[in-house]
């Protein structure tokens, strides 16, 4: 994997020499506790930067989230979710799709990639996670403070004594200004992935290399620290890792930096960093 320099602030955009000879189809998948609404700033930045490159943009919702918030999803497994999301993409008519996912989305993406590899041009994992085989998401995170158990991601604050709203502030909002934080927290908590997805343990990394992939590592992520993001990137088998100086919600706090990375990586056909930045 090849590391790249972090983008130093919210307004600076890295200079690129992208070739604009192709158009791209993007599909975006949200993480846990969120919906497709979370991508609005990044999609706006994507159109602003790459209006000549983008053919279509599709935002996906897991049952129980976003546009599917009222769906009953208690009986749905992670396989059911992956199959439904594949169906949503196929129903849209899109092919050669650049699939972009955040956080928990990586777990569904891993199944989608192996089920329909020819549907995707590239998969881009934005601070995504995936447990070990026979391990649940809950066991991967653990129930202690970060660093207590080297085999668990851990929490930035003691979950036994810290109210959830305080943990949300520390986990999601550590690089947000006050208006952004207020807007984000005002929407957080209304969306819920199917409960059975958190109990899934049949993880299998075989076949992930059938689709080209990139990992976007967030240097100030207070949910999935950089060291753990590197672990997850290795499990996903990504070809490259790109770093951005941002917290977990990079799509909200650094939308233009993320959009630039997405455009570069979507058009990447094996070029080196020097060819694109």
Image (tube, rainbow, N blue to C red):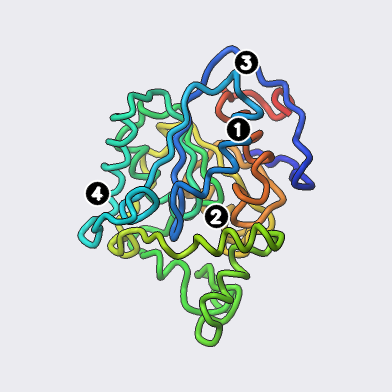
At x 70%, y 63%, the residue is 178
Q: Which residue is drawn at 54% across and 75% down?
A: 165
CB atoms of marks 1 and 4 within 8 Å: no
Disc 3: CA contacts within 10 A as few (<14), some (14-19) or many (>=20): few
Q: Residue furthest bottom?
A: 161
Residue at image mark 2: 231
Instruction: Report the mark closest to the observer, 1 or 3.
Output: 1
Determine which residue is flagged by label 3.
Answer: 20
The residue to which callout 4 is attached is: 80
Per the rendering, the mark at residue 259 is: none
- The answer to whether residue 69 is left or right of residue 222 is left
Label 4 SS: helix
Q: Which of disc 3 and disc 4 is earlier in sequence?
A: 3
Q: Where is residue 106 in the image (x, y as percent from the top left)?
A: 44, 49
Q: Nearer the viewer, mark 1 or mark 4?
A: 1
Counting residues from the start of the chain, the first of labels 1 and 3 encountered is 3
Examine the image and state in which quarter residue 53 appears.
top right
Q: Position of 49 compared to 61: left or right? A: right
Relative vertical location of residue 27 with respect to residue 64 in this rendering, above or below: above
Q: Is mark 2 on a helix, strand or loop?
A: helix
Residue 159, image x, y percentages: 52, 80
């Amino acid at each position: 994997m090849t590391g790249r320099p972090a983008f130093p602030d919210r307004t600076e955009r890295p200079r690129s020499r992208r070739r604009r000879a192709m158009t791209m189809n993007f599909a975006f998948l949200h993480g846990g506790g969120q919906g497709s609404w979370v991508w609005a700033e990044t999609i706006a930045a994507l159109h602003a930067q790459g209006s000549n490159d983008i053919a279509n943009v599709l935002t996906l919702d897991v049952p129980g989230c976003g546009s599917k918030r009222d769906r009953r999803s208690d009986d749905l497994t992670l396989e059911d979710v992956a199959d439904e999301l594949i169906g949503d993409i196929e129903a849209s008519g899109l092919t050669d799709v650049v699939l972009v996912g955040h956080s928990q989305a990586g777990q569904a993406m891993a199944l989608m990639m192996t089920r329909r590899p020819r549907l995707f041009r590239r998969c881009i994992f934005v601070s995504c996670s995936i447990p070990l085989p026979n391990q649940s998401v809950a066991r991967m995170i653990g129930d202690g403070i970060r660093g207590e158990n080297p085999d668990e991601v851990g929490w930035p604050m003691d979950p036994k004594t810290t109210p959830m709203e305080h943990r949300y502030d520390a986990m999601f909002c550590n690089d947000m200004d006050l208006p952004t934080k207020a807007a984000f927290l005002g929407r957080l908590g209304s969306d819920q992935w199917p409960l059975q997805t958190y109990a899934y343990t049949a993880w299998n990394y075989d076949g992930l290399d059938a689709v080209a992939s990139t990992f976007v590592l967030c240097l100030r992520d207070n949910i999935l620290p950089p060291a753990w993001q590197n672990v997850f990137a290795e499990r996903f088998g990504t070809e490259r890792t790109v770093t951005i100086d941002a917290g977990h919600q990079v799509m909200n706090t650094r939308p233009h930096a993320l959009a630039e990375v997405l455009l570069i990586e979507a058009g990447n056909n094996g070029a080196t960093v020097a060819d694109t930045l």
